[in-house]
Amino acid sequence: MIATSTVFLALAALVVATPARRAASCTFPDPPSTSSLSEPMSVTGDFDGGNVRFDRGEACTGQSEGGDSNAVFLLEDGASLSNVVIGADQAEGVHCLGSCTLTNVWFEAVCEDAITIKQDSGTSTISGGGAKGAEDKVVQHNGGGTVVIDSFCVQDFGKLYRSCGNCDEYGQTALTVLSSMYERHVEISNIIASSGSSLAGINSNYGDTAIIDVDSSTIDDVDSICDTYEGNDNGDEPEKLTSNESNDYCQF
Ligand SMILES: *[C@@H]1O[C@H](CO)[C@@H](O)[C@H](O)[C@H]1NC(C)=O
């Protein structure tokens, strides 16, 4: 009797401890209608886009660093964005000014980056959805805290996640004010990733960590699971320290 209930309790604890998971999908929605915004849509609370395509009506101009005013959606602290397709004609995708939740947000053609996380602390979650064609980064983490990426599809990309390697008060261009350097964390699970250079790039000298669950993921033609860099706060190009090596910082 004792043995049976102990086993039962252990199983119950396991069930409670395991978050709900669903398989990632790479079937991008193809909305019949597009809403071209003349300025970023600011979201407080929840916004469900009903799978409409949103853009800014202007073609991507490459890798020049934009700001909040170039975003399609600006999520205030605690905001949630769901069921949205971001089209090609835009520059900066989604900017989270605090902790945010993105559910089923699809990027048809990433421009400078898809999602910029600026929270000081806390956890932002990206689940469901996907991103295609990011020449460089999909998720750019400029603030602090943790980013959770689960059930996400990423195809033809540079880096799925990068902890900013050289954010400082004035930013790389001296025109944009970025954030300062932080210790940052990312957890990646249950993804489908194909044709990319790396899933995560982190600054080990700032104590960043990346925990990547490769067993729950499908990873094809990706050069590196995780890279560490020597980050800095003076705008220099960060030096890469390790590549595709599991260690205290890159855990996979
Ligand atoms: C990167 O590491 C993973 C996991 O150890 C391994 O399966 C993969 O072959 C490595 N990739 C390259 C390009 O060496």
Image (cartoon, rainbow, N blue to C red):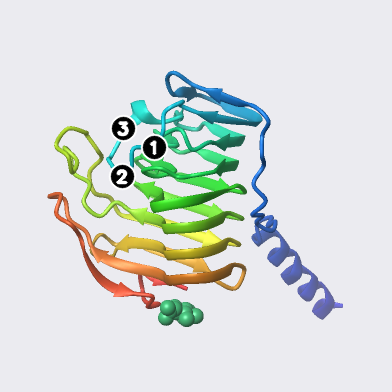
Q: Residue at x 72, y 71 (%)?
A: 10
Judge depth for marks 1 and 3 and give the one in front.
1
Marks 2 & 3, CB-CB < 8 Å contact: no
Secondary element under disc 3, as helix, strand or loop, is: loop
Of the residues shown, which amino acid type is indicated by label 2?
Gln
Q: Which residue is mark 1?
A: 60
Secondary element under disc 2, as helix, strand or loop, is: loop
Of the residues shown, which amino acid type is indicated by label 3?
Gly
Residue 34 percent coordinates (x, y): 59, 27
Judge depth for marks 2 and 3 and give the one in front.
2
Left or right of residue 11: residue 111: left
Q: Which residue is mark 3?
A: 67
Of the residues shown, which amino acid type is indicated by label 1?
Cys
Residue 183: name its quadrant. Answer: bottom left
Label 3, residues with CA under 10 Å away: few <14, some 14-19, many ≥20: some
Q: Which residue is mark 2?
A: 63
Residue 210: name its quadrant. Answer: bottom left
Identify the mark at residue 23; answer none if there is no mark: none
Q: The N terminus appears in which quarter of the rendering?
A: bottom right
Q: Residues under labels 1 and 3: Cα distance?
A: 14 Å
Left or right of residue 218: residue 205: left
